[in-house]
Amino acid sequence: GQNIDQPTEMTATEGAIVQINCTYQTSGFNGLFWYQQHAGEAPTFLSYNVLDGLEEKGRFSSFLSRSKGYSYLLLKELQMKDSASYLCAVNEAGSYQLTFGKGTKLSVIP
Amino acid sequence: SAVISQKPSRDICQRGTSLTIQCQVDSQVTMMFWYRQQPGQSLTLIATANQGSEATYESGFVIDKFPISRPNLTFSTLTVSNMSPEDSSIYLCSVSGLGGGQETQYFGPGTRLLVL
């Protein structure tokens, strides 16, 4: 089975940088995903990490350390539209399924 | 990227009735999944829809309550049977095999169900 933990809520200021952490425990790791979900909408894919290190994609970056069972999503130059829930999801080896964390609700304030 | 659509987008149903939700993709995909997202909660996988065979259900979900069909590589249905207010939720289909990693899942817009 898998256990995925991320903070429930975070607040950050427009223009700032915020880091959302995710820790996981899994019997066989095959990749970690970050999704963004605005209220009332479906999740949208942000990033995929399967090797250690940082993946950068515009204002968003995602980091993975497999030995520590740890990932973070880094959002730079925050905008009001970044207010959303951010979901960490893990894929277990030998399966196409994703197990989702409970999500972190990010509020960006002026 | 593919276009994933769901019908209906929302519905209000009476207790004891059933609702069938459709998920259509505009290209062939390897895997299709059905999730439930209850208010304020994260996503819970109901089942994997297998093309040409019975769906694979997760713990806590059974075929009698959530029958699933997948007649081809672009279409699937989920039925919520004998509904109760506890079934009020968002139901999401997702697909993988579109790139970004074989296991990356892309979600349909969801079906918002309210059971009275």
Image (cartoon, rainbow, N blue to C red):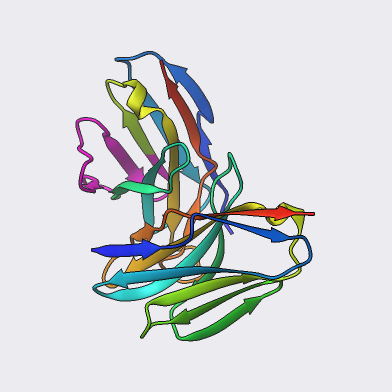
Quarter the N terminus of chain A occupies: bottom left
Rendering coords of residue A49 (x, y %) = 48, 76
Residue shown at 46%/86% (left/top)? A52
In reply to whether residue B101 is colored magenta, the answer given is no
Question: A34 or B19, which is in the foreground?
Answer: A34
The main secondary structure of the magenta stretch is loop
Query: Is A25 situated left or right of A31 in this image?
Result: left
Residue shown at 74%/68% (left/top)? A16
Residue shown at 36%/70% (left/top)? A24
In reply to whether residue B63 is colored magenta, the answer given is yes
Query: Is B10 situated left or right of A96 in this image?
Result: right
Quarter the C terminus of chain A occupies: bottom right
Please say if B72 is above or below B99: above
Query: Is A75 situated left or right of A1 in this image?
Result: right
Q: How many marks?
A: 0
Magenta residues?
B52-76
Please say if B77 is above or below A94: above
Rendering coords of residue A42 (x, y %) = 54, 46
Rendering coords of residue A79 (x, y %) = 76, 59
Question: A74 or B49, which is in the foreground?
Answer: A74
Residue shown at 30%/71% (left/top)? A25
